[in-house]
Amino acid sequence: HDSNDTQANKLTGEQVAEHNNKDSCWVIVHGRAYDVTEFLPEHPGGSKIILKYAGKDATEEFEPIHPPDTLDKYLDKSKHLGEVDMQTVEQEEKEFDPEEEERLKRVERMPILEQCYNLMDFEAVARNVMKKTAWAYYSSGADDEITMRENHNAYHKIWFRPRVLVDVEKIDTTTTMLGTKVDMPFYVTATALGKLGNPEGEVILTRGAKKHNVIQMIPTLASCSFDEICDAAEDGQCQWLQLYVNKDRAVTKRIVEHAEKRGCKGLFITVDAPQLGRREKDMRSKFADVGSNVQNTSGDNVDRSQGAARAISSFIDPSLSWKDIPWFLSITKMPIILKGVQCVEDVIRAIESGVHGVVLSNHGGRQLDFARSGIEVLAEVMPVLRERGWQDRIEIFVDGGVRRATDIIKALCLGAKGVGIGRPFLYAMSAYGLPGVDRAMQLLKDEMEMNMRLIGASKVSELNSTLVDTRGLSMHTATVPHDTLGLNVYDPLIGPKEKAK
Ligand SMILES: Cc1cc2c(cc1C)[n+](S(=O)(=O)[O-])c1c(=O)[nH]c(=O)nc-1n2C[C@H](O)[C@H](O)[C@H](O)COP(=O)(O)O
């Protein structure tokens, strides 16, 4: 218990509650009070969401969206009002939410982890147990989500030409990425707002990546602070930085230099998001979450019709262009990779610009709908590079829709150095925490070993384009309205105890 005098120095809940409007707005975050009155019009998420918590404890809403050092970094010290005696703060009566009640019942009956046999199982479970806003943010794609489904669908258009009577007693799945030796040819790609799915956030992915000796790409828009994620890594663990370039280049320079100082081994500049895509599931759920009155955006200076994603990304510089590449090459020694390249012309341009790699990606279908899948672009790129003798000039990664080790093998056969995986690890983390991420990575490892054995390759360097038939790859059939693999794989509503009635 605090002694009386320190208690006396603390603000009381009543004192904070007096400042509950736009003329004087105080909020409590992590037991400390802040005067955000002047900040209201600058808040990227609009003023309404803050005013909803004016005079109250905003921690629960604040936590998943903002790294813990946000207020220290961006709110002038004079606005930090000090500690609050939380015993005097009236805890908000949680209004009854039938949907939340239903969700909590599904959590109780969710399948045990051992019943997840592949990455799609995690998606099926997460869909039923995650909070609506979190599921909406993670699962949404842009517009009609055609590209999001095509990403996974494209792998179904590639077939294997396995070789037999190859000695495959020993299988070696290791490879190197940007000079770092890894146990598997996949990395954990950058995905924002990890605490939407799990209160611990991205540090769970750090620990999973360590356990399986794969690389984690740290997102600019992580819920955890960059330093928290670096601190969660163990000695020798390799991490990369994913960078959204800020209109204020001094901010970007500081972030890049700090990442290099912290030991990041690659700078992945995201180039497919000069503006974040329109993700309608996210937009719908976000509004439901903060109460519909925010829809009439009277007085808000932010276009809230774009959901949370837009709100947290207004700093991104849409003027970024090839002329900026020399500056990036001048401010860091880290290898520079362009993440989100989508045609062979830009791969050639990237090589000529002096960067060290590209990720062929459409941002998981969250940006331009009808962009082609990374794997289809890879099949376009490699023959052109081989013609020029440039196939080894840079490292080429792909991401988007990778759900099986056979997807990874197809990408490597077509010349990728490795693949990025996003949503499956988010779903595993959200449904089962670190054990979920651990199991997801182990499942991929087991699948990789079996499938390499069956295709007739004992190590990654033996995977080549003669092992695949890609003739069907550029045919874009009408996409099914849902990714049936995810929907039918599981009935999470019937848990181990309850049998189907
Ligand atoms: C699923 C997801 C992906 C995001 C992502 C957030 C989520 C929830 N976010 S986003 O908020 O801006 O859209 C990022 C991001 O911060 N930066 C980035 O470069 N890619 C971002 N991506 C794209 C990601 O790096 C991969 O390109 C994509 O996830 C690969 O597809 P799969 O999810 O199907 O593996």
Image: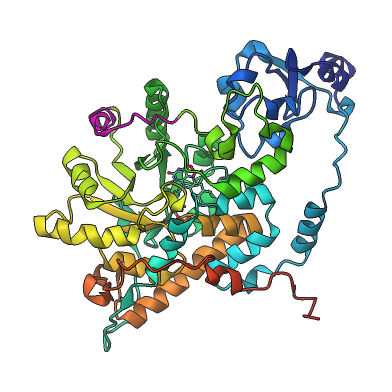
Q: Is residue 490 left or right of residue 369?
A: right
Q: Nearer the viewer, residue 46 or 381?
A: 46
Residue 150 position by quadrant? bottom left
Residue furthest top as drawn: 78
Would residue 289 be visible to someone looking at this image?
Answer: yes
Residue 385 screen position, x and y as percent: 16, 56
Question: Could you tell me which residue is drawn at 34 percent across and 70 percent down?
Answer: 172
In the displayed structure, 134 sits above or below 476; it is above
Residue 92 position by quadrant? top right
Question: Could you tell me which residue is drawn at 23 percent across and 46 percent down?
Answer: 346
Q: Which residues are magenta?
A: 316-330
Q: Quadrant of the C terminus?
A: bottom right
Is residue 188 in the magenta section?
Answer: no
Residue furthest bottom as drawn: 165
Residue 376 screen position, x and y as percent: 31, 62
Residue 58 screen position, x and y as percent: 74, 30
In the displayed structure, 172 sits above or below 352; it is below
Question: Could you tell me which residue is drawn at 86 percent across and 27 percent down?
Answer: 89
Question: Could you tell me which residue is drawn at 24 percent across and 44 percent down?
Answer: 356
Would residue 200 be visible to someone looking at this image?
Answer: no
Residue 205 screen position, x and y as percent: 53, 51
Q: Is residue 424 left or right of residue 176?
A: right
Q: Main secondary structure of the magenta part?
A: helix
Q: What colour scheme governs how the chains and residues are painted in the rendered image of this protein? A: rainbow
Q: Quadrant of the N terminus?
A: top right
